[in-house]
Image (cartoon, rainbow, N blue to C red):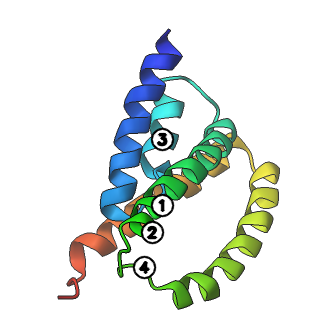
Amino acid sequence: MKILMIGLLVGAAAGLAGALCGVGGGILMVPAFVLVLGMGQKHAVATSLAIVVVTALAGTANHVLRKSELIDWKLVACTAVGAAVAAWYGTELMRNLSNQQLSRIFGILLILVGARMLIMKTAA
């Protein structure tokens, strides 16, 4: 029952954050899975990746169905190829790291990206 309740709450928060901010939801899911459910970092990352597929499809489907002009399909095509290849090899790299190493990398990434977002000026 705990996993169901936590899953629903974290899923709702991640879906909302993903749709509002363009983050995959892993930024919320991974820490929640590790801290609340006691998952290992690798397990949390892999589980988050599987969930992000669903949330990304749902958000994209909404844009497509509403004929939104907010998606730059040329950029999607160009970026998706590199992202898919990097994700494949990133997954292989993740399997070779310890949970502690992966947690540290994730934490540093959150700090750096968060600091950058707070400092930079946004486009109009």
Dots 2, 4 in contact, CB < 8 A? yes
Q: Is residue 2 left or right of residue 16?
A: right
Q: Secondary structure at mark 3?
A: helix
* Few, some or many residues within 10 Å of mark 4 (<14, 14–19, 20+): few
Which residue in the structure is indicated by mark 1? 61
**Residue in the image at 61% along x and 38% along y:** 44
- Residue depicted at 42% across the width and 79% down the height: 71
Residue 113 horizontal/vertical position (percent): 39, 68
Vertical arrangement, residue 63 with respect to residue 48, above or below:
below
Which circle's residue, 1 or 3, is located before the other in the chain? Answer: 3
Inspect the image, locate mark 4, and give the three-letter code of the amino acid beneath it. Ile
Label tally: 4
Of circles 2 and 4, the one toward us is: 2
Separation (CA) of disc 1 from disc 4: 11 Å
Instruction: Report how far apart the C-alphas of labels 2 and 4 lie in the structure.
Output: 9 Å
Q: Which residue is mark 3?
A: 29
Say what secondary structure mark 1 lies in.
Answer: helix
Residue displayed at 33% across by 63% down? 21
Percent from the top left, x then y, of residue 80?
64, 77
Mark 1: few/some/many CA within 10 Å (<14, 14-19, 20+): few
Residue receiving disc 2: 64
